[in-house]
Amino acid sequence: MALSHSKAQPDTIQHTCDSSRYYRNYVLFILTLVYAFNFIDRQVVGILSPFIKADLGLDDAQLGWLKGIYFALLYTLVGIPIAWLADRYSRVNIIAVSLTLWSGFTAASGLATNYLQLAVARIGVGIGEAGGSPPSHSIIADLFPKEKRAGALAIYSLGIPFGIMLAFFASAFFLQGGTADWRTVMISVGLPGVMLAVLLKFTVKEPARSAAQTSPTTAALQPAAFTSIRALLKIPTWWGMALGISFGSFGNYAISTWIIDYYVRAFAGLDITQLLIVFGIINGTAYALGVWLGGVVADRWGRYNKRAYALLPALALMIGVPAFYFSLQVQDLWLSVGLLTFLLFTSGSYLGPCFAMAQTLAPGNIRAMSTALFFFVLNIIALGGGPTLTGIVSQALVPALGETEALRQALMYLLIPYGLSILVFLWTSTKIAKDWERSAG
């Protein structure tokens, strides 16, 4: 009997490991789905922008504020205290409550009858979404070792392209060629998030935090949270990755919220439903593939050269940014869309590596806070700046150039932040190896 028990023990251990792996992947799937709902609710205003503009009589500057800073300001500010809570209390509960909140405000956006009501609803969506990513990143960091985090966080980041894809598909379905009300879309994409919050609450358990946080010995030796934050903010690689993704996302957020407006103006008579479906497919394939490959390639290349985590995004953008420039020059709609696809594919590569660095470089007691601070930098610059400044610049140019050419010129100015992103990633590649070795894991 003892011999038989000895033989069965490895099988039991293997079964436990397999179960743990399956559960870990399930949690990653659920968190990715939550992140997808984050971007459905965030993206839908940009998709519906031409309809909202016509219905409420808005100009480009008003739309820019609505798409950008109204959402981003409290989103970034509230994220910091929420991250403080996530480093101390149940991250699963925080995500579930936040998902319910932002989904409810998205549905409420569909009830808005004027600009002020819609702006208030967008602020509410931003407050809710602040509780999504910091605790999610912290959970993933506790479930995956640092050598696999870029891949895991790249999968999590697939919530971005898949969320955008679903937002395009839902808009195409409900708008039915422009005959349905944009409010129907808002309500329809908001309410399912509440059901997902219930599923998350009852199927995902709060994971054990890293040993550095839970061991009495190591916890006693750990510095206070404020000391850890100060040390984190002195790491060159942390700032390099934060600014690199911020400048790149400045362009991406501006494009994602203004490109439908541009195509509707530049190519009169286009089939809006067909365009929305095509963009949904592109985001669900090319952009998603770029996001996934970015994490996988960075982790594999990074085994031999840690510079890969910064070099890969720089090299990818060197390919994608020229394609974006030419997409604004051509006179054929589908050629323009095809060139823009190169940018979507290549720009997805920086998400996994950047988010992985935000976790890997952070002491265990401030992982959620690291992501919140990372997102603070990212979203003030990118989400707050990209859509808003593009709208302001476009509106300023309208008297001289007309609506179509003014928006095209405003989009052209995005070459500047993209260039800054490439330069910052190249600089960061010279710092990353040393900072990686100093990280606690």
Image: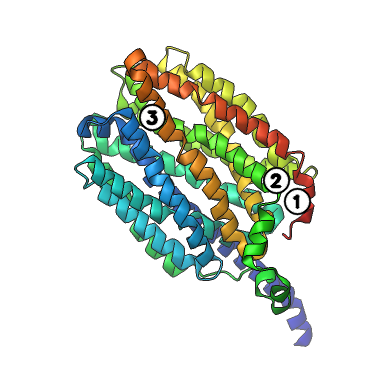
Label 1: how many residues lie within 10 Å, few (<14), some (14-19) or many (20+)?
A: some
Q: Which mark is residue 313?
A: none
Tell me, yes or no, whether the two marked residues, 2 and 1, touch with CB atoms within 8 Å: yes
Q: Name the residue under label 3.
A: 391
User: Residue at label 2?
Assistant: 237
Q: Is residue 179 visible?
A: no
In the rendered structure, which amino acid carries the disc numbered 2? Answer: Thr
Q: Residue at x 24, y 40 (%)?
A: 115
Residue at the location (66% across, 62% down)?
228
Question: Quick one: 306 or 193, which is closer to the camera?
Answer: 306
**Is disc 1 placed on a helix, strand or loop?**
helix
Q: Residue furthest bottom?
A: 1
Q: What residue type is labelled 3?
A: Gly
Quarter of the image with the C terminus in it: bottom right
**Residue 85, position as x, y percentages in the image:** 50, 66
Q: Does the rendering let one see residue 395?
A: yes
- Decide: marks 3, 2 in contact (CB < 8 A)? no
Q: What element carries label 3?
A: helix
Residue 298's place in the image compared with 278, above or below, is below
Residue 351 in percent (x, y) is at: 58, 43
Q: Is mark 2 on a helix, strand or loop?
A: helix
Q: Mark 1 points at which residue?
A: 436
- The residues bearing labels 3 and 2 have C-alpha atoms spaced at a distance of 32 Å
Q: In this view, does 43 lie to the left or right of 1?
A: left
Disc 3: CA contacts within 10 A as few (<14), some (14-19) or many (>=20): many
List x then y, in percent, for residue 86: 52, 65
